[in-house]
Image: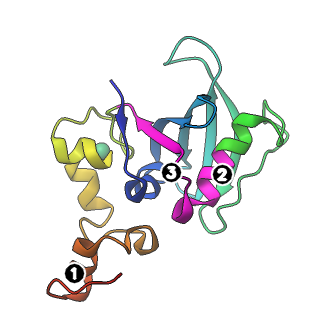
Amino acid sequence: MEHKLEKTDAKNFVLAGKAHFTLLSGVTGTHYTYKVNKHKTDDIYFIKLLVGNNNDSDYQYIAFFRGDDMRVRTSSKSRMRADSKPVRAIQYLIENFDNLSPQLSIFHMCKCGRCGRTLTTPESITRGIGPECWDRLGGDAQLYPSTLFSDTHWVDKVFGGEGESVA
Ligand SMILES: [Zn+2]
């Protein structure tokens, strides 16, 4: 089962540490499935691409990025060139979280982006992160204000406003 992620949840989900998702272009219908895993201790992420039919085993390492600069790069171990479409597609996502095209859709597999466990509640499925991991990531006062700034509910929580418009 797949579930479409809201754009405002994309950054929290993809950077949670164990994200597994599909990107779909509404223009061409092209889709790619990725795993973005964070290094155990360092602020660095490794990107793998699904290249076969087995959704559990057929993944190849294609690129990486650091959390502090968010620039997707290939390395000598990458199995695809920097100008290949799957690398450019994930590069577009990572480098444009705050300004993603409406034509791009992101689907997660109903597994928590941080721990990989199956998501069960509607709230968890909506954001792609389970309740315990959500709390560990900072709870409702979330990680990435820029992507959520248009969400008045979030703004109210953080700034204590009473229904003030932030548009
Ligand atoms: Zn989790």
Gap in Å between the C-alphas at discs 3 and 1?
26 Å
Camera-nearest label, 3 or 1: 3
Which residue was labeled with disc 1?
156
User: Nearer the N terminus, badge 2 or badge 3?
Assistant: 2
Q: Is residue 3 left or right of residue 158?
A: right
Q: Residue at x 32, y 84 (%)?
A: 166
Q: Nearer the viewer, residue 71 or 156?
A: 156
Q: Quadrant of residue 65?
A: bottom right
Which residue was labeled with disc 3?
102
Identify residue type, mark 2: Tyr
Q: Position of residue 132 (x, y in %)?
A: 22, 52
Which residue was labeled with disc 2?
92
**Quadrant holding ligand 1?**
top left
Q: Which residues, given as a range, are shown in magenta?
A: 90-109
Identify residue type, mark 1: Asp
Residue furthest out toward the top: 53
Q: Are marks 3 and 1 in contact (CB under 8 Å)?
A: no
Mark 1 lies on a secondary structure that is helix
Q: Position of residue 16 (x, y in %)?
A: 43, 52
Q: Nearer the viewer, residue 67 or 82?
A: 82
